[in-house]
Image (cartoon, rainbow, N blue to C red):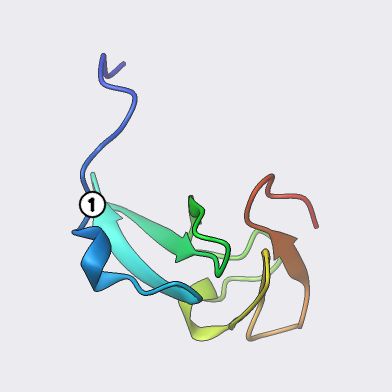
Amino acid sequence: MNDKPYVSALPLAELAPGAMRCVMLDDEPVLLVHTKDGAIHAVHNICSHAYARMDEGRLRGNRVICPLHGASFDVRTGAV
């Protein structure tokens, strides 16, 4: 268990509002999302329904769309 609640992944300047980017943290692919309202979210980069890279999908507001089968996930909660 890590005592630090947050891990530095990349400078905020490298992730524009409305953009998303995959980074590797402790050998895990993590999708960083900077929504247009200025919020930052982090979710696993692999779709839970089908093995697809979410960074190859689309960001629509607070939802990321799977590039393989079109399911959308709320980046704030992870809900489908």
In this view, the residue in front, 69 or 39, is: 39
Q: Position of residue 3 (x, y in %)?
A: 26, 14
At a point 54% along the width and 65% down the height, the residue shown is: 35
What kind of element bears circle 1? loop
Q: Residue at x 63, y 56 (%)?
A: 75
Say if 43 sits above or below 50 in the image: above
Which residue is denoted by mark 1 in the rendering?
9
The quarter of the picture where residue 1 lies is top left
- Frontmost residue, 78 versus 36: 36
33 lies above or below 21: above
**Label 1: how many residues lie within 10 Å, few (<14), some (14-19) or many (20+)?**
few
**Furthest-front residue in this view:** 37
Q: Which amino acid type is shown beneath numbered disc 1?
A: Ala
Residue at horizontal 45 percent and vertical 72 percent from the top: 17
Task: Count up the numbered dots.
Answer: 1
Image height check: is 38 above or below 70?
above
The image quarter containing residue 47 is bottom right
The image quadrant where one finds the C terminus is bottom right
Residue 71 relative to residue 3: left or right: right
- Report whether 77 appears left or right of 3: right
